[in-house]
Image (spheres, helix red, strand yellow):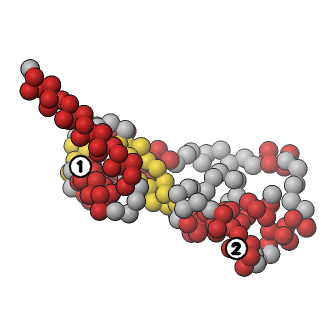
Amino acid sequence: MLNLLCISKEEAFGNKIFGMKWFQDGDSNTKFFHTIMNNKRRRLILKKIKKDDNTWIEGSDEIAKEAINFFESQFSKDDSHKDFSILNCLPCVINEEDNNILDALPTMAELKEAVFSLSADSAPGPDGTPLPRSFTHSCLILIPKTPNPQRFTDLRPISLSNFSSKIISKMLNTKTA
């Protein structure tokens, strides 16, 4: 009994030391960080996944195809309603002067201000500014919701955008503010 108590206390102490080490070096670009992330990445690799019909699929190519099918169906909407006549009721809020400001090329000072005001750890917010598809492409990452994900519903997709979309979004938002 005493031996189990000692082991339990050693584990608790080890966890506290690990927690302090993570707090100190966890977000830094260190060997410690990369070791932890590589171990986590190895643990989280999907070797097989269950489809909606309860059949298992294996192999990265088959899993990738199924992931594309699953998330495309999740994120696509029915385009059957195409009556845009309701938009005629909305007032025009962009006048010629505002349109000219939005069309003008940014100065180097404006660009520098936009870049240096951004946080490297943040994503652009939903400011309502439409950007071309080439700037809005992002990397979709799947985060497990459960310790052992078996289906795509056990995974949470997050979108990682590129920095250029942050800059453009910030500059457009600043010009319209």
Indicate the secondary structure of the residue bearing disc 1: helix
97 w.r.t. 5: above or below: below
Q: Residue at x 24, y 34 (%)?
A: 12
Tell me whether circle 2 and circle 1 mark residues in contact (CB < 8 Å).
no
Label 2 vs label 1: CA separation?
A: 42 Å
**Neighbour tally class for label 2: few under 14, some 14-19, many 20 plus, Cα within 10 Å:** some
Count of residue discs: 2
Front residue of 9/152: it is 9
Q: Quadrant of the N terminus?
A: top left
- The image position of residue 50, as x and y in percent, is 26, 41
- The image position of residue 57, as x and y in percent, is 22, 48
- The image position of residue 157, as x and y in percent, is 43, 47
Can the viewer see residue 131? no
Q: Residue at x 10, y 22 (%)?
A: 2
**Neighbour tally class for label 1: few under 14, some 14-19, many 20 plus, Cα within 10 Å:** few
Front residue of 35/83: it is 35
Residue 10 placement: quadrant? top left
Q: Residue furthest top?
A: 1
Instruction: Give, as a three-letter code, the residue at label 2.
Output: Leu
Front residue of 159/61: it is 159
Instruction: Give, as a three-letter code, the residue at label 1.
Output: Arg
Q: Which residue is mark 1?
A: 43
Q: Residue at x 54, y 62 (%)?
A: 120
Q: Residue at x 68, y 73 (%)?
A: 112
- The image position of residue 29, as x and y in percent, is 38, 63
Indicate the secondary structure of the residue bearing disc 2: helix
Q: Which mark is residue 78?
A: none
Q: Which residue is mark 2?
A: 111
Q: Quadrant of the C terminus?
A: bottom right
